[in-house]
Image (cartoon, rainbow, N blue to C red):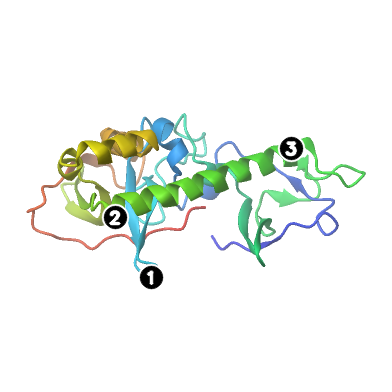
Amino acid sequence: MARNYVLLDKEAHKNIKIKQDPSLTHSKGSHLVGVSIREFARAASSVPLVLVKDEAANRYHCTGLYGLVEGVNLYYSAEGWQSHFAPLNLQRYPFDVRPNGDQLSIFIDKDSDLVNEKEGIALFNEDGSVSEYMESRQKLMAELVNSENLTQDFVKTITELDLVEELRLGIRYASGEQRQLVGLYSISEEKLMKLDDEQVLKLHRNGFLGAMYAMLSSMGQLNKLVQLSQKSEQPIAAIQILPKDAPQAQPAAEPAKAN
């Protein structure tokens, strides 16, 4: 779905209201969703956490693996969001924080189905001040920005320590078809165990060690994808992490920008 973000303006958008959508319908086409490091502890019990590489910028992004096919989010259902956890990158919509000159400002997707002037929660009060709802959105966006900055430090650290390794998944569908999903990355537990005490202590004190083990433990949620796929057009029988020397097959899905 195309987005049309414009700078939020209290005059231009004084009559705007936001409809609430607990099903997170805007997420249904996102198989990869950005997850920030401060969310890892909760996210690890809900969704596999992986890294995807932005080749143009030559850096990695932390994401939740919400589907195995581009354009299909297995956690989305019209009956309700299929998890106890939803990343801030989904909760923030239809808002976003983007550069505006030399500062960051709040933008809104003016073409979103959630944005209108008739139904929902107002962004501004009659006197022009921000509503209580909008105040909560501003706090959420500030939390997301702060966590994203820490996430970038985390990614820089694990890259410098050469702890990133390719992750390949073998998928066996109920139909008997088999394929591989490549282009994903994770933490090398083998290399992590070889770090010296000083490096480990530093990682522990800045919270990065716990984040790495959260990523590793989240692989147990691959079974959640199998479970959720049973109502999809391609039910999955099993997903396994392939050994490093397994023959490579199908190319990776393109990394999706968080919605």
Q: Is mark 3 on a helix, strand or loop?
A: helix
Q: Earlier in the sequence, mark 2 or mark 1?
A: 1
- x 45%, y 36%: residue: 39
Q: Which amino acid does label 3 sit on?
A: Tyr
Q: Is residue 162 left or right of residue 121?
A: left
The image shows residue 83, relative to residue 16, as above or below, that is above
Q: Can residue 33 be seen in this view?
A: no
Q: Is mark 2 on a helix, strand or loop?
A: helix
Separation (CA) of disc 3 from disc 1: 37 Å
Q: Which of 162 and 229 is in front in this view?
A: 162
Q: Where is residue 172 in the image (x, y as percent from the top left)?
A: 18, 45
Separation (CA) of disc 3 from disc 2: 41 Å
Separation (CA) of disc 2 from disc 1: 18 Å
Q: Where is residue 84 in the image (x, y as percent from the top left)?
A: 47, 29
Farthest front residue in view: 198
How many marks are shown on the rendered structure?
Answer: 3
What residue is pinned by disc 3? Answer: 133
Q: Is residue 61 visible?
A: yes
**In the image, which disc is placed on residue 160?**
2
